[in-house]
Amino acid sequence: MKTISIINGPNLNLLGKREPDIYGSLTFEEYFMELQALFEDKAELHYFQSNSEGALLDYIHKIGFSHDGIVLNGGAYTHTSIAIGDAIKAITTPVIEVHISNVHARESFRHHSYFSAHCAGVLVGLGLKGYELAIRALLD
Ligand code: DQA
């Protein structure tokens, strides 16, 4: 049984309420229950969300040398946080970066990620399905 952490960054606690045309109408808590049922025999899933960059860094440091994989949607910190990029580089746990929306089809400030170069893979624009596919990739 592998241990995988899903980490969501700022504003992703508003999934279900926030711009549903872009992000859908399901809350992440509802979707996380679906994921837990889907992977119940294969993975122990953990979920952490914070709107604070420091709290995200502390969690990445805490689990980044022991868990088998991280699925990270850093929200807007993806485009601003050199510190989280450095943390992904520093840890030994492989990270897959996920974005619900196709960031490349949106504003140009969303086209650059400080994370991608340090990640094992990147999934964008596949909706919440991206989290499931990232977990599958980490389990393979
Ligand atoms: C996002 C894309 C980011 O640009 C944005 O700031 C988010 C969500 C996504 O999942 O599509 O908060 O990471």
Image (cartoon, helix red, strand yellow):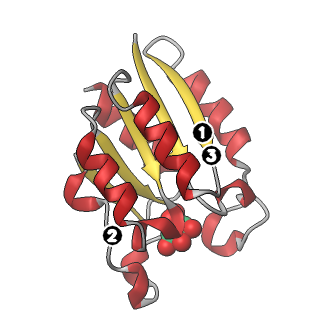
- Amino acid at the residue labelled 2: Ser
Find numbered disc 3 in the image and state the secondary structure of the residue it sits on.
strand
Whether residues under marks 3 and 1 lie with C-beta atoms below 8 angstroms apart, the answer is: yes
Nearest the viewer among 38 and 104 is 104
Q: Which residue is mark 1?
A: 48
Looking at the rendering, in which quadrant would you find the C terminus? top left
Q: Which mark is residue 113?
A: 2
Left or right: 119, with 38 as reference point: left
> Mark 2 and mark 1: span between their CA atoms?
21 Å
User: Where residue 40 sits in the image (x, y, percent)?
Assistant: 54, 16
Find numbered disc 1 in the image and state the secondary structure of the residue it sits on.
strand
User: Where residue 119 sits in the image (x, y, percent)?
Assistant: 25, 50
Question: Relative to 133, is 41 above or below?
Answer: above
Residue pictured at 48% horizontal, 11% vertical = 41
> Mark 3 and mark 1: span between their CA atoms?
4 Å
Q: How many other residues sit within 10 Å of disc 2, few (<14), some (14-19) or many (≥20)?
A: some
Find numbered disc 2 in the image and state the secondary structure of the residue it sits on.
loop
Q: Which residue is mark 3?
A: 49
Q: Image quadrant of residue 65?
A: top left
User: Where residue 18 sits in the image (x, y, percent)?
Assistant: 74, 68
Asked if residue 100 can be seen in this view, the reply is no
Left or right: 29, with 87 as reference point: right
- Amino acid at the residue labelled 3: Gln
Looking at the rendering, in which quadrant would you find the N terminus? top left
Q: Which mark is residue 67?
A: none
Question: Relative to 140, is 13 above or below?
Answer: below
